[in-house]
Amino acid sequence: MGGRYSDIRRGGQLKIDLDNYINYLTQPRERNVGNGGDRSPQTAVYVTPFGKDLDTDELASVNAPQSGYAALNSFLVASNGADLTNAIGTKTPVEINGYRPAKVVWFRNATKVKTVVRSSVTNRQYLKYEGDRDTCPFGRAAATDDMMDVFLAIKADIKQANSTLEVNRISLTRERIAL
């Protein structure tokens, strides 16, 4: 019988969170222009989009953080159905307006270090895990490759090669093409 009114109690907490969020939005804040850190160094890489066919001699030109490319490029290989290269060779690079490639995001740490922090928006406490985060774009190796299948193969390779990490999360940022 303890769960009988759990939705009502949860609704009360969500109401408090909503009020805190509305208060956060209505508070005047200073603009944070120019106070951020430098963008990490980027490197030009080339991919074949999943959702757009290119000519056989073309590759889409995109940028990748150098640290993310170094950490993840060995997993983004044709055996997984992925395509990523930093050498254009005889192909022609093309810029696709409104195109954002699929990306692998890898968050990891050898130990599970967590701290309790308080949200500046809802004032609710949550656990924050410490670790390193890298991201790298990827494309398809063959015309029949599916983005999710390729991602799952990449994820399996990363997990297998780094099985001793206590925090080892791999996620996908899906490809977007503006019409």
Image (spheres, rainbow, N blue to C red):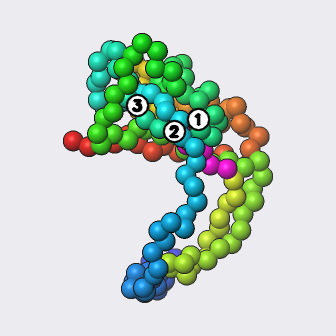
Helix, strand or loop at mark 3: strand
Residue drawn 65% across the image and 67% down it: 127
Looking at the image, is mark 1 or mark 3 earlier in the sequence?
Answer: 3
Q: Is residue 156 above or below residue 37?
A: above
Residue nearest the observer in this picture, 141 or 124 = 141
Helix, strand or loop at mark 1: helix
User: Does residue 174 appear left or right of residue 2 in this picture?
Assistant: left
Q: In the rendering, at what x and y percent does residue 98 appear? A: 30, 43
Q: Amino acid at mark 1?
A: Tyr
Q: Which residue is mark 3?
A: 61
Residue nearest the observer in this picture, 101 or 95 = 95
Separation (CA) of disc 2 from disc 3: 10 Å
Residue drawn 47% across the image and 79% down it: 30
Residue nearest the observer in this picture, 158 or 63 = 63
**In the image, residue 81 lies in the stretch drawn in magenta:** no
Magenta stretch, residue numbers? 132-136
Separation (CA) of disc 1 from disc 3: 14 Å
- Mark whose residue sits in front, 1 or 3: 3
User: Is residue 11 at all visible to an observer of this figure?
Assistant: no
Q: Amino acid at mark 3?
A: Ser
Q: Which residue is mark 1?
A: 69
Circles 2 and 1: CB atoms closer than 8 Å: yes
Helix, strand or loop at mark 2: strand
Q: Amino acid at mark 2?
A: Ala
> Where does the C terminus fall, quadrant-wise?
top left
Q: Which residue is mark 2?
A: 64
User: Does residue 29 appear left or right of residue 115 in this picture?
Assistant: left
The crowding category of the residue bearing disc 1, from other C-alpha atoms within 10 Å (few below 14, some 14 to 19, many at least 20), is many
